[in-house]
Amino acid sequence: MNAFYPKNGRVILHVDMNSFYASVEMAYDPSLKGKPLAIAGNPKERKGIIVTCSYEARSFGVKTTMPLWEAKKLCPDLIIMTPNFDRYRSASKGMFDILRQYSHLVEPVSIDEGYIDITDSQELGTPIEIASSIQAQIKSQLDLPCSIGIAPNKFLAKTASDMKKPMGITVLRKRDIPARLWPLPVIEMHGVGAKTAEKLKGIGVETCKDLAYANDIQLKSLLGINGLRLKEKANGEDKRPVDPDSIYDYKSVGNSTTLPRDTTNQNDLLSTIDKLCSKVSARLKQKDVVGTTVQIMIRDKFRKTITRSRKVENPVMNKEDLSHYARELFMKHWNGDPVRLLGVTVQDLLEKGEATEQLDIFSYEKEAKKEPLYDVLSQLQEKFGKDSITKGVKGKDKKPIHDKERDTSFNKDFLRE
DNA sequence: TCTGGGGTCCTAGGACCC
DNA sequence: TCTGGGGTCCTAGGACCC
């Protein structure tokens, strides 16, 4: 029995890579080390915002999501690179491979951060020894810095990893909460943004301590179920398990793009929709999933954004079907104003195997008639009623799609750190 | 001369059903 | 002749995160 582990309860680490994209570029080209570096999109395509920047750049006041021109004003010597996602994905895989050497309970939450449940890893050392070893290994093998939080649950571990950057290791125990969590303003909490912080201020809640003692009824009416969850977290309570399979549980797959300039040209807009559909379709195929809801997104020059979606009778995966629905939605809902951004997303995903299984009982018709599946299905729907066909592929009959054969590589394609 | 792109989760109203 | 109380599904929007 290791005295550093609790008799009951868990030990969770949260590993957070420091300014990940910028650090990967520095590892790739060490001459960049020590210099103000930013990863940003191309301003000529109106994508010139800072995605990540090095600590040297941050010392000039450069921040994530800041427009490039503003960053340059603050830091004229800023080195700017466009993202190399393949490098980041590969570094990410290396990082998670290292984490899995310490426990099989590793849950990636984004390309550059994840949780590890080391409750049953006592033979490897104390929690601090394990964290130090992970940090040292990531540094020596990948030349990348990270911060690690050690705590009895995910929320506290995440909070702890934020407390010391870069290359920090921070323990946050239950008994540390009054001194270390409660003084923080609520906006520092994971899950509290500007809007929620403003609402909370309205009922006199400004610090995490205020939140920890806030009135349940008031919180519920102000923020819904999330208000009560936030209060639990402010009290250091969080029962969510570390789930290694959560990355296989896709809810939606989508792509969007800001156009080089606002346009009302219908041909250009439709061909952009087609391109987005091709990308989404390729990703659906790669994940081997289909979806039953198609959604488009249209943003205008005032950045006002609308989404329009429809449930489709038959699961879509290929780009022709997807384009058909996406174009239809666009033509039905576009008001003719100049468009800044377009997006296409497929939701209500199912494993492809499962969806075809549901349809297999009708396959003799498909074979006999040699017609596209959707035509056959619409006929069957007329014959048997809508429910007889659609029930099996939607709603509660659907199984979550994480029962896949385990692929240990990190394959959720996040774009940002 | 501004504000990207990938997601998740929650809410709320209306349709519809029993 | 004026109307309840469940529930689910669909759609749209919003808050938040990295």
Image (cartoon, coloured by chain):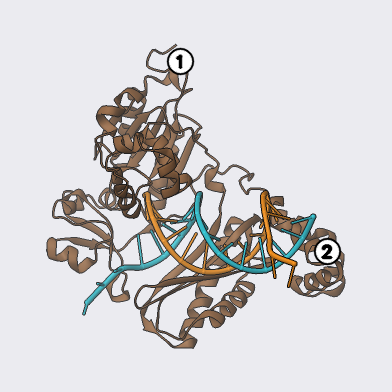
Chain colours: A brown, B cyan, C orange
Quarter of the image that includes the N terminus of chain A = top left
Query: A309 or A108, which lies in front?
Result: A309
Mark 1 belongs to chain = A
Report helix, strand or loop for mark 1: loop
> Taking the image as drawn, is residue A157 in sight?
no
Answer above or below: position of A50 versus A267.
above
* Vertical side of A138 occupied by A301: above or below: below
Q: Residue at x 63, y 46 (%)?
A: A404
Q: Which residue position is annotated with label 1? A: A7
Q: Which residue is pictured at 28% across the width and 33% down the height?
A: A182
Question: Which mark, residue A409?
Answer: none
Decide: is B16 above or below A248. below
Query: x and y percent of residue A71 in the render?
Result: 18, 63
* Label 1 crowd (10 A; few <14 / some 14-19 / many >=20): few
Mark 2 secondary-structure assignment: helix
Residue on which the image places disc 2: A363
In this rendering, position of residue C15 left or right of residue B15 = left
> In terms of depth relative to the viewer, which is nearer, A255 or A238?
A238
Residue A366 at x, y percent in the picture: 82, 69
Q: Earlier in the sequence, mark 2 or mark 1?
A: 1
Q: Position of residue A318 (x, y in %)?
A: 63, 69
Whether label 2 touches label 1, CB < 8 Å: no
Q: Quadrant of residue A135?
A: top left
- Along the horizontal axis of the image, is C10 left or right of A374? left
